[in-house]
Amino acid sequence: MRLQKYMALCGVGSRRKSEDLIRQGRVYLNGKQVVEMGTLVDPRNDKVLLDQKQILIPVEDKIYILLNKPSGTITSVKDPQGRETVLDRIGWKGSRIYPVGRLDYETEGALILTNDGDFAFALTHPKYQVEKEYYCIVKGSPKSKAVNRLRQGVNIGDFVTSPAEIKYMGSKNGNAEFRLVIHEGKNRQVRRMFEAVGHPVLYLKRERIGSITLDKLKPGFWRYLSKEEIIELVDSIGGTYKNGSF
Ligand code: URA
């Protein structure tokens, strides 16, 4: 990139101001004073000095947020239909962050928002097998044959799910409660799994993503993930957390 653009990204001032500084002979590139205006810089390898001090592009602070998404909020940064988005819900005014994966409009529960692209990629990539745990209430009382089909993997139309952990938790007003752990994140996966065995989901909540649990976080509320939580999550998928980033 051009030197004046690099200088502007380092926070020295506008490109015009950076050009003035170059003209004044105050800028050195790899030990040589720069006089040419169109000089190119490789930000990873070149060393730029202004008034004998090295200038660097600041590393963007990484942000990791856990939201307990309430039902009736859309997992998106913007909604053309004007519905409340998860960003509206947390009232975020800072730098660009986005949700990792998605929960349906009606689904509640754990949703991570971040500006760390590598972290978001790893959390959603099937290779890393991050567990997602859901609590759900489904219509009627599935027989053990239906539950076993879910356990072994079921055809949901365009996809056969991997084996899932599934535990019957009890019944509520003639409907059944389950806890389900899956690794995949296909669109409406849990709903489609139960539909495939004839028991539509009536209520769905994601309670855990890997080692991150909601604990006492109420629907509609959010908090920052602690450094320990991020390290544990990254570690559990075989990555390393360095300098505030995956
Ligand atoms: N599975 C679903 O069906 N919906 C969600 O929101 C998440 C997982």
Image (tube, helix red, strand yellow):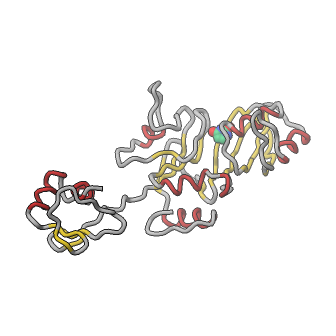
Q: Is residue 235 depicted above or below 93 in this figure?
A: below
Q: Nearer the viewer, residue 192 or 4?
A: 4
Q: How many marks do you count on the picture?
A: 0
Q: Quadrant of ligand 1?
A: top right
The quarter of the rendered structure image containing the N terminus is bottom left
Q: Position of residue 91 (x, y in %)?
A: 39, 41
Query: Can you name the residue that lies furthest to the right here?
Result: 145
Residue drawn at 14 percent across, 63 percent down: 35
Q: Is residue 173 at all visible to an observer of this figure?
A: no
Q: Position of residue 224 (x, y in %)?
A: 46, 56
Q: Quadrant of residue 219?
A: top right
Q: Is residue 67 depicted above or below 159 in this figure?
A: below
Q: Position of residue 150 (x, y in %)?
A: 82, 43
Q: Nearer the viewer, residue 34 or 96?
A: 34
Q: Is residue 163 at all visible to an observer of this figure?
A: yes
Query: Can you name the residue that lies furthest to the left here?
Result: 24
- Position of 151 compared to 179: left or right? right
- Position of 134 compared to 97: left or right? right
Residue drawn at 79 percent across, 51 percent down: 165
Q: Is residue 138 depicted above or below 68 in this figure?
A: above
Residue drawn at 24 percent across, 68 percent down: 48
Residue drawn at 44 percent across, 26 percent down: 82
Q: Position of residue 225 (x, y in %)?
A: 49, 58
Q: Quadrant of residue 123?
A: bottom right
Q: Nearer the viewer, residue 191 or 4?
A: 4
Q: Nearer the viewer, residue 235 or 178?
A: 235
